[in-house]
Amino acid sequence: MNKTIILERRPVGKPVLTDFKFTSEEKPLTGTGEILLKTSFVSVDPYLRGRMSDVKSYAVPFQLNQPISSGIIAEVVESNHAGFSKGEFVSGLLQWKEYQKSDGIGLLKVDPAKAPLSAYLGVLGMTGLTAYLGLTEIGKPRKGETLVVSGAAGAVGSIVGQIGKLLGCRVVGIAGTDEKVEMLKSKYGFDEGVNYNATSNMKEAIAALCPDGVDIYFDNVGGDISDGVLANINKFARLIICGSISVYNETSVPVGPRVEPLLIKSSALMQGFIVGNYATKFPEVMQQLSIWLKEGKLTYSETIIDGFDNIPRAFIGLFEGKNNGKMIVKI
Ligand SMILES: NC(=O)c1ccc[n+]([C@@H]2O[C@H](COP(=O)([O-])OP(=O)(O)OC[C@H]3O[C@@H](n4cnc5c(N)ncnc54)[C@H](OP(=O)(O)O)[C@@H]3O)[C@@H](O)[C@H]2O)c1
């Protein structure tokens, strides 16, 4: 039989295990031009929370009682398709199922000889692309500038900080525990870090860590943390709005300082983005990230949770800071 995870209930506030339901169905039969895929690694991502609500966004909401989908690495275990052979691995937006069939459209072949398969969901996948493209396209970093990164010990944040260093910035990271802050400096080479859970005044903490002010802010979390960073921006600062995980579970519209006067006063640019906006640049960015990895200039962390049954738990763990680097489930 073939286990599947469906969205049984739209989460209210923070997702809970009972929002998800395990069902079982027959393993699909493949026809001409189709392949059978066996799930190997599942990416759980904060943006999936948005798709679980019935609100209009850049990605369509998941339907109730239908399988959830996310980035998945799968093995081709049967092939009736000229373009795919048994034993190959692919990456794609696939369903939370142990087995599924595909016509191959939208799948990308990945090579386990070139990098560990899980890396194609992280540093060599959406994570790395988001980090590089958000930072370079909007942040336009210049040598000597101060870059602040929130969600710095997470998948995207940990890569942003390292790229910032490679491009000559002074990098300050914000994360949720002392251990994570230590890792920012010891593993990823950040210059400074701050534990937002141990800091009562983020505005002062950032002022102390950024004596020359903040030129670029790569924001993964939004909310109070970002309010504290924004109070320290320099003239012509670039504010890269990548994610807002601190407010994804809010049930009412969060209210904070009005940023418009601040943006005028500092002639700052605040820009949100979706990594898909830059799809034409994916091949060249993947090449650059692969080179840096091979040269040992870029490193990455993964929190790998074992077992199909733990996919919902791993997803919920994102909102509890349970991951260092990319959160992945190994099947
Ligand atoms: N725009 C795009 O195209 C794009 C693409 C990919 C990801 N994103 C966004 O980028 C952000 C990072 O994604 P990711 O995949 O790298 O996830 P991630 O950072 O690896 O995982 C989430 C992390 O967020 C932190 N967090 C959770 N709740 C928080 C809260 N209330 N306040 C502050 N921090 C909190 C936790 O770390 P701590 O222990 O430090 O709290 C947790 O480990 C997300 O907001 C995501 O939606 C955007």
Image: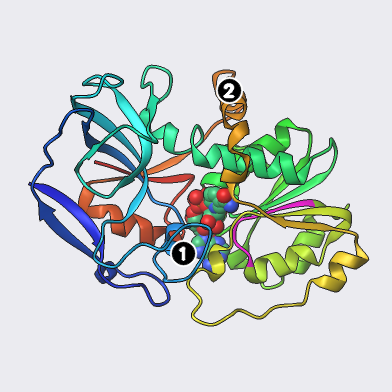
Q: Work out whether residue 176 or residue 254 is closer to the camera in this orientation and state it.
A: 254
Amino acid at dot 2: Gln
Magenta includes 82? no
User: Would residue 177 be visible to someone looking at this image?
Assistant: no
Scheme of colours in the image: rainbow
Residue at 92%, 66% in the rendered image: 265
Q: Is residue 168 above or below residue 304?
A: above
Q: Callout 1: few (<14), some (14-19), or many (20+) C-alpha neighbours within 10 Å?
A: many
Residue 276 placement (x, y as % from top left): 56, 44
Q: In the rendered image, which residue does mark 1 sit on?
A: 50
Q: Which residues are magenta?
A: 216-222
Q: Is residue 138 above or below residue 268?
A: above
Residue at 42%, 70% in the rendered image: 53
Give the label on residue 287, or none. Answer: 2
Does residue 298 appear left or right of residue 24 in this picture? right
Give the label on residue 106, or none. Answer: none
Amino acid at dot 1: Gly
Q: Is residue 277 above or below residue 63?
A: above
Q: Residue 20 occupies which quadrant of the picture?
A: bottom left
Q: Secondary structure at mark 2?
A: helix
Q: Earlier in the sequence, mark 1 or mark 2?
A: 1
What is the total number of numbered labels drawn onto the structure image? 2
Q: Is residue 183 above or below residue 256?
A: above
Residue at 43%, 32% in the rendered image: 120
